[in-house]
Amino acid sequence: MNYKNITVAGSGVLGSQIAFQTAYKGFDVSVYDINDEAIEKAKERITKLKQRYQEDLSASQEDVDAAFNRMSFHSDLAKAVAHADLVIEAVPEVIQIKTDFYKQLGSVAPEHTVFATNSSTLLPSQFAEATGRPEKFLALHFANEIWINNTAEVMKHPGTDETVFQDVLDFAEAIEMVALPLHKEQPGYILNSLLVPFLEAAQMLLVKEVADPETIDKTWMVGTGSPKGPFAILDVVGIKTAYNISKAKADATGSQEYAKLAQLLKEEYLDKGKLGVETGEGFFKYPSE
């Protein structure tokens, strides 16, 4: 594994975390997003992460400043990937957006560059052809708050080169993740195969007006001893991601329940700027630092 320069494409909640963790572990990282406004938001997110690393990992000011200084920010994809050994894609969970992105990426990235998707629910084989380099493409999936919940699920598709698979597992370990190899494609990998049905079950209780988020979370926490309930987890993941997943399921299956859930998330949360922990309010309110 000779990776030195890493590009993270998409600087949302998880993209920003992946970029900062990678820089914190000594890699040069370029962050790409679609426009300057998105880049400015990324810098704000990452600046907040510096404080979390100091609180949670006892990182020094020098350590977090050095990590930030190893990062560059770009709204021009060709510049962002000019020297990339590995591109980690963390763009929205929408098939067309990802497909278009990979076609563009494949045309501007160096020939040796490996591509990895951080998709939570979609399979690498859905995009392998669009990349133009299926043998150098796989999935690398992180859990939210990756500096604490440090899983990295590495999932190949049938056309992934075995050396690439091993190199990405080695990279995951190099940024202090627990590298978890998946030898067959599985929607949702291991973590989300367990987590997504749990979160959806909670959301369906809300849609059916069985109980409110506070009662549902309290039930789970008291009944199982878990530190967080499903709606607190959704606030960390980001309600936009939950919306994208529910809308995609509604569109794919024609399910009225998922359509109703997507509508609820949009009207009661997204349209009101309640995106989760990131904005200080989602299903619950979060006091400012």
Image: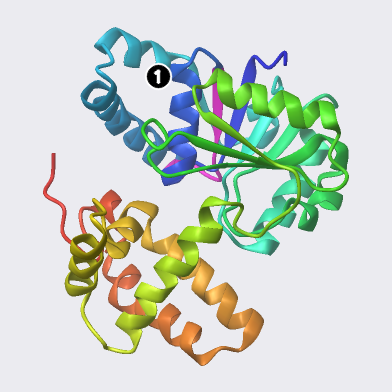
Which color scheme does this rendered protein use? rainbow
Q: Quadrant of the C terminus?
A: top left
Image position, residue 48 (x, y; %)? 27, 33
Q: Is residue 251 left or right of residue 104?
A: left
Q: Is residue 18 above or below residue 213?
A: above
Q: Is residue 198 above or below residue 81?
A: below
The magenta span reads 28-38
Q: Residue at x 60, y 59 (%)?
A: 121
Decide which of 11, 283 is in the foreground and name it: 283
Amino acid type shown at disc 1: Phe
Q: Is residue 122 above or below residue 118?
A: below
Q: Quadrant of the N terminus?
A: top right
Work out whether residue 110 can be spotted: no
Work out whether residue 197 can be spotted: yes
- Looking at the rendering, which quadrant does residue 263 occupy? bottom left
Q: Residue at x 40, y 37 (%)?
A: 149
Q: Is residue 22 left or right of residue 205?
A: right
Image position, residue 207 (x, y; %)? 34, 85
CA neighbours of label 1 inside 10 A, class few (<14), some (14 to 19), many (20+):
many
Q: Residue at x 77, y 53 (%)?
A: 127
Disc 1 target residue: 68
SS for callout 1: helix
Q: Is residue 114 left or right of residue 257?
A: right
Q: Residue at x 45, y 33 (%)?
A: 150
Image position, residue 32 (x, y; %)? 56, 36
Q: Is residue 124 above or below residue 107?
A: below
